[in-house]
Image: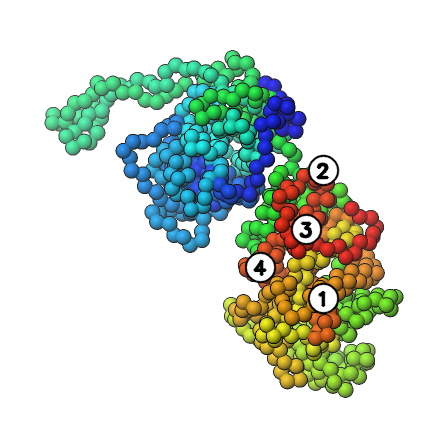
């Protein structure tokens, strides 16, 4: 069997390849029903893609004992591609039926709702689509080829034309002429090809009926990689109409398994049926009765009819493979290789395809341990697939790739506590994490104030002296100790006694606006701490009524647990915030996403948000209602309206470029201040990066002040209408941060265009113990 490498193919072969974008819809018609947005038609899984659309069908029917692979396959398609998939399957097993259509048969469609977990039972069937936003697969009481036809031309035509049809995975091999010419899986792919759509038939060759789910997952991962490659390099001269892929389902299957271009083994066989003696009588009512049970003379004797039972000698077919020279599909499977057979839509092979086919190695493995329903999951996975076609994505937090230092490049995006900090410190070449370990100088409010104050002493000309509110750190366990603590910060105490200023109190370690209060006298400050303690005593009662938290007014829902908080930050309240008449004169702050990478570069994402308070602003001297003063939308719950979150650059009535310039300079100085506090407070690492949500407030004189820095910002507050802002952020992070770390140079350029002003601006580049 000759070898053709995808990296080093012959000039003749390479001339056939052309790039195709995977940013298309897919219809999948599989032999098994699949667990994803796939349409399964017939008894084969066929994937048809149009613009952004693919279709899947099969010949084994919906998930079950006859169709054990389809849900795993569709799950892999969802994980490892950004394809829009529809599924149309036969309603039962219909193997060995080739490309048949049943004349005169009126087909009826039904639907099932697949389980989100492969291997689990589906819901249905039912005869009318529910259209409730859940994934639904179509089942048809027809042949696999009919499923492909109806799926392409009728079931999913509202999604646009189909670009790719996938049929499979078949439960068993489809190698050699004896199997391919009879296969419903290949028949459905052939039907797709005859409709003018590139099609692929996929089959899993198993040696044991006892299937290992891990082997199945590996086969599906390799299948998706291979299918993406074949689609991306489909010959533009129309020499290939469809491919037949056979994958050996065994414990040895891995990324190292060789892939061979093959032709069809033109084998022959003997009888596929055996004669059986007719021992059945049929009564006048149609009841079948064994001859031995005949006791009544009125039963019609129909014994002695010629009857034959399907019983091919498949073992002899398999054993005969070794008698043929290598280069054919059956030989490849028998020797543990993956076979890829290019075909015309007349079952003829295509000349010029020989040897080994090598898939490009995965750029890296992305471990995304957020749930698929989380707000950021689709942005991460879709951009990973579109920018890095060969990336492998896993979601299991216990996947060995996270813990083992095997030389595999790993990009780990997870909650802070789920990251592997031991590997983060030890494996700086292969492991990239989405968070630093030590960064309290930024994200704890009292430490941030301390870092800036210390920096101002060393750098008296820093802009932070004018762009960070006057702040005081307060450590307090109980309200009764307030006087003692005020004596330690006497500058603040004296201003408090004068009563000319308003102040804002923030628990240092709370987020999402929890526990924030306004005050301007010592008595009000003492009342605040006493109310904290009262709330602490009522925690149990509050937990019982947690369901009502979402609809509580701000003043009732932003308490804190003082038993867990002792550090506070007091800041002078900015009483003259910028008001915009076009936005109802509501107070707002600017949420800016800042990305720190390596050790150390700091970027500011230009596409910023403006977050508005619920009520029209009035000075706290006249109205101290928090709904007019707090702009954190997390506190607004069901009261949040369409005007609560807006794009910063869409605002009118002030010089936005001036504010943008101040934000960039303030951000650079803030991170420089954090660095100056020492590695125990902020330790940049060359193999880590982190996205922060940094909040700024603009006053009526267009002076911008930094308020706080938040780790793991709540992206969901952006909402659905402005979700492209978050999508653009992750696209920029993957392009500017992740790709250079793994030395990925072949990012799909088409996916990085059109970002406009949604880009990362480098504001600080300071080498701190090395970088990349």
Q: Which mark is residue 659?
A: 1
Q: Earlier in the sequence, mark 3 or mark 1?
A: 1
Q: Which mark is residue 743?
A: none
Q: Are marks 3 and 4 in contact (CB under 8 Å)?
A: no
Instruction: Find disc 4 in the rendering and name its residue.
Output: 722
Query: Disc 2 versus disc 4: distance between alpha carbons?
Result: 39 Å
Query: Disc 3 versus disc 1: distance between alpha carbons?
Result: 23 Å
Secondary structure, mark 1, is: helix
Q: Are marks 1 and 4 in contact (CB under 8 Å)?
A: no
Taking depth in this image into account, of 266 and 17 the one nearest to the observer is 17
User: Residue 343, position in %: x, y?
Assistant: 49, 25
Secondary structure, mark 3, is: helix
Instruction: Find disc 2 in the rendering and name its residue.
Output: 407
Q: Is residue 589 depicted above or below 720 in this figure?
A: below
Q: Which of pointers 3 and 1 indicates the residue nearer the eye?
A: 1
The reply to whether residue 168 is in sight is: no
């Amino acid at each position: 069997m000759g070898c053709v490498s995808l990296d080093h193919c012959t000039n003749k072969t390479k001339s056939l390849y052309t790039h195709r974008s995977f940013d298309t819809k897919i219809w999948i018609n599989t032999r098994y029903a699949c667990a994803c947005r796939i349409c399964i038609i017939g008894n084969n899984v066929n994937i048809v893609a149009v613009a952004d659309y693919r279709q899947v069908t099969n010949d084994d029917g919906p998930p079950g004992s006859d169709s054990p692979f389809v849900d795993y396959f569709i799950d892999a398609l969802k994980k490892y591609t950004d394809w829009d998939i529809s599924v149309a399957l036969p309603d039962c097993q219909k193997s060995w039926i080739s490309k048949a259509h049943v004349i005169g048969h009126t087909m009826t469609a039904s639907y099932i709702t697949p389980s989100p977990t492969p291997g689990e039972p589906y819901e249905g069937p039912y005869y009318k689509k529910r259209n409730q936003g859940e994934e639904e697969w179509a089942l048809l009481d027809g042949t696999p080829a009919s499923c492909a036809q109806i799926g392409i031309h009728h079931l999913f035509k509202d999604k646009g034309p189909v670009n790719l049809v996938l049929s499979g995975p078949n439960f068993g091999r489809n190698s050699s002429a004896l199997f391919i010419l009879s296969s419903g899986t290949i028949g459905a792919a052939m039907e797709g090809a005859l409709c003018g759509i590139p099609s692929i038939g996929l089959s899993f060759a198993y040696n044991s009926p006892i299937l290992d789910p891990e082997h199945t997952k590996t086969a599906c991962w390799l299948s998706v990689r291979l299918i993406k490659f074949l689609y991306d390099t489909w010959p533009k001269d129309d020499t290939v109409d469809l491919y037949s892929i056979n994958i050996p389902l065994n414990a040895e299957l891995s990324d190292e398994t060789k892939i061979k271009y093959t032709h069809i083994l033109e084998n022959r066989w003997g009888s596929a049926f055996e004669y059986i003696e007719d021992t059945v009588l049929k009564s006048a009512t149609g009841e079948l009765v064994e001859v031995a049970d005949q006791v009544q003379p009125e039963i019609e004797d129909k014994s002695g009819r010629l009857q034959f039972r399907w019983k091919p000698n498949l073992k002899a077919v398999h054993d005969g493979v070794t008698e043929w020279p290598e280069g054919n599909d059956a030989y490849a499977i028998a020797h543990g290789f993956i076979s890829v057979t290019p075909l015309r839509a007349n079952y003829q092979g295509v000349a010029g395809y020989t040897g080994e086919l090598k898939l490009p190695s995965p750029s890296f493995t992305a471990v995304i341990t957020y749930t698929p329903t989380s707000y950021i999951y689709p942005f991460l996975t879709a951009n990973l697939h579109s920018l890095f076609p060969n990336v492998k994505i896993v979601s299991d937090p216990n996947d060995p790739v996270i813990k083992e230092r095997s030389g595999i490049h790993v990009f780990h995006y997870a909650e802070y506590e789920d990251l592997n900090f031991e590997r983060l410190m030890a494996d700086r070449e292969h492991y990239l994490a989405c968070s630093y370990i030590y960064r309290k100088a930024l994200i704890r409010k009292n430490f941030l104030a301390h870092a800036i104050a210390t920096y101002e002493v060393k750098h008296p000309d820093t802009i932070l002296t004018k762009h960070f509110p006057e702040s005081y750190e307060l450590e307090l366990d109980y309200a009764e100790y307030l006087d003692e603590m005020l004596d330690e910060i006497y500058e603040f105490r004296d201003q408090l006694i004068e009563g000319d200023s308003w102040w804002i109190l923030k628990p240092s370690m709370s987020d999402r606006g929890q526990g924030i209060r306004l005050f301007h006298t010592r008595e009000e400050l003492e009342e605040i701490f006493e109310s904290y303690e009262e709330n602490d005593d009522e925690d149990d009662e509050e937990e019982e009524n947690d369901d009502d938290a979402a609809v509580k007014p701000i003043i009732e829902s932003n308490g804190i647990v003082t038993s867990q908080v002792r550090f506070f930050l007091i800041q002078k309240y900015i009483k003259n915030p910028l008001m915009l008449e076009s936005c109802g004169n509501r107070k707002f702050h600017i949420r800016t996403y800042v990305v720190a990478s390596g050790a150390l570069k700091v970027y500011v994402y230009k596409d910023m948000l403006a977050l508005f308070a619920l009520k029209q602003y009035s000075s706290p001297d006249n109205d101290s209602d928090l709904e007019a003063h707090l702009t954190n939308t997390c506190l607004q719950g069901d009261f949040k309206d369409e005007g609560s979150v807006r794009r910063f650059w869409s605002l009118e009535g002030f010089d936005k470029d001036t504010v943008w310039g101040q934000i960039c300079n303030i951000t650079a100085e803030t991170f420089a201040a954090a660095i100056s506090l020492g590695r125990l407070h902020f330790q940049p690492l060359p193999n880590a990066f982190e996205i922060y949500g940094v909040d700024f407030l603009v006053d009526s004189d267009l002076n911008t002040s930094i308020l706080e820095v938040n780790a793991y910002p709540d992206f969901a507050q952006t909402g659905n209408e402005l979700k492209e802002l978050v999508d653009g952020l992750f696209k920029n992070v993957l392009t500017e941060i992740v790709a250079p770390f793994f030395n990925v140079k072949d990012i799909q350029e088409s996916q990085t265009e059109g970002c406009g002003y949604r880009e990362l601006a480098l504001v600080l580049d300071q080498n701190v113990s090395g970088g990349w």
